[in-house]
Amino acid sequence: MNWRIIAIPATLIPIFIIAIQFDIKFEDVLAIGVIPFVLAVIAMMIKLGLQGIKFAYISHKYLGKFDSFWKLSGVRIGSEFIKFTTPMFVGAEFVVIYYLHKKGVAPSKSTWIAIMDIVTEVFAGGLLSIMAGIIALMHGAYVVGVLILGISITITSLWMVLFFLSSRRTFQVPKIFVSLTKRFGKEKGAKYIDQTNSWMEEVCTMSRKNLRTTESKKVFTISFLFSLASWSFYGISFMIIAMGTGYIVGIFDSIMAVMGANAIANLPITVGGSGLAEFGIIAYLNNLDPFHLVIPEGTVAWDAVIG
């Protein structure tokens, strides 16, 4: 079956869930204003475009010009929609790994490229979310601040430690999983374990080969800056929508609000963070008061959050 047939309707799932959760009608969208809505969409398109360009840049730096720059960008942009159909936003990496593999790139190399893309994304987003959490604490929103900081620090630290540790040691499947897989999977299970260990060893070899070079440090820095810019446009899109409804939010506050919301949406509770992101924005903007999370439906503030 063509994966595109499944992928296209799958990307609509979060939209339907949010619409049902909050009883969103077409007039709610129109209340934002056509021009602000279009401008916000353009801001989000720039965000996605920057993510695509970053992935294509990383791919060409490590693999050469094996494929069109714009095709690679398009694949990364498309993968972004897939991740919104899964808890904790996982899924995008599998799309790009699959695409690179279909182009003849070895699984270990395609995985490493995807990891480099993810780590720079997580690092930039994590730093912005941590800033949002600190600001929330400074304003006395202890519950929201601790929640944002707890999630952001945990996820960011885990990714960064594993990424840089992979250049110093070789990871293998934990023994407890090896025992369970071999017990229930017999010979086939043992085969899968060997394949997985071999793949992980190759990924770690790629890390040792590349991470300590001057060129890799340059690629990481540029990719990180691309990620910071793309996350910033995420915040700008909310600011544009909010201003269209008369709810004035500055650029910095808007970025902090959506990044705090993004951290909360990383909880593995709902599909694509549906509902959690909206909760996060309301919690952050509503006087930063975690015990008064109220934005009445039908108000401009409500329309801004839903938009």
Image (spheres, rainbow, N blue to C red):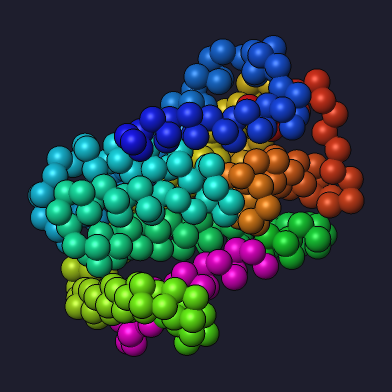
Q: What range of the chain is rendered magenta?
A: 150-172
194 or 235: which is nearer to us? Answer: 194
* Left or right: 286, with 6 as reference point: right
Give yes or no for residue 163 being in the magenta stretch: yes
Q: Is residue 60 magenta?
A: no
**Quadrant the C terminus occupies:** top right
Which residue is drawn at the image coordinates 81% and 61% (left, top)? 143
In the visual, does 270 lie left or right of 294? Answer: left
Q: Residue 197 placed where, x, y %?
A: 33, 78
Residue 304: x, y in percent?
A: 68, 28
Residue, far right: 291
Question: How many marks can you see?
Answer: 0
Image quadrant in which you'd find residue 281: top right
Q: Can you see residue 161?
A: no
Please give left or right for residue 47 compared with residue 76 in the image.
right
Q: Is residue 100 above or below residue 133?
A: above
Q: Residue sitting at 40 percent across and 58 percent down?
A: 118
- Where residue 52 appears, as percent x and y from the top left, is 32, 43
Q: Looking at the image, which is closer to me, 206 or 183?
A: 183
Seen at 55% across and 47% down, the residue is 86
- Is residue 110 visible in the rendered structure shown here? yes
Q: Is residue 130 above or below residue 210?
A: above
Quarter the N terminus occupies: top left
Rendered position, 203 above or below 33: below
Work out whether 24 lies above or below 218: above
Q: Residue at x 75, y 29 (%)?
A: 22
In the picture as drawn, the residue positioned furthest to the left comes out as 65
Q: Position of residue 114 (x, y in %)?
A: 33, 58
Task: From the image, give the main secondary structure of the stretch colored magenta.
Answer: helix
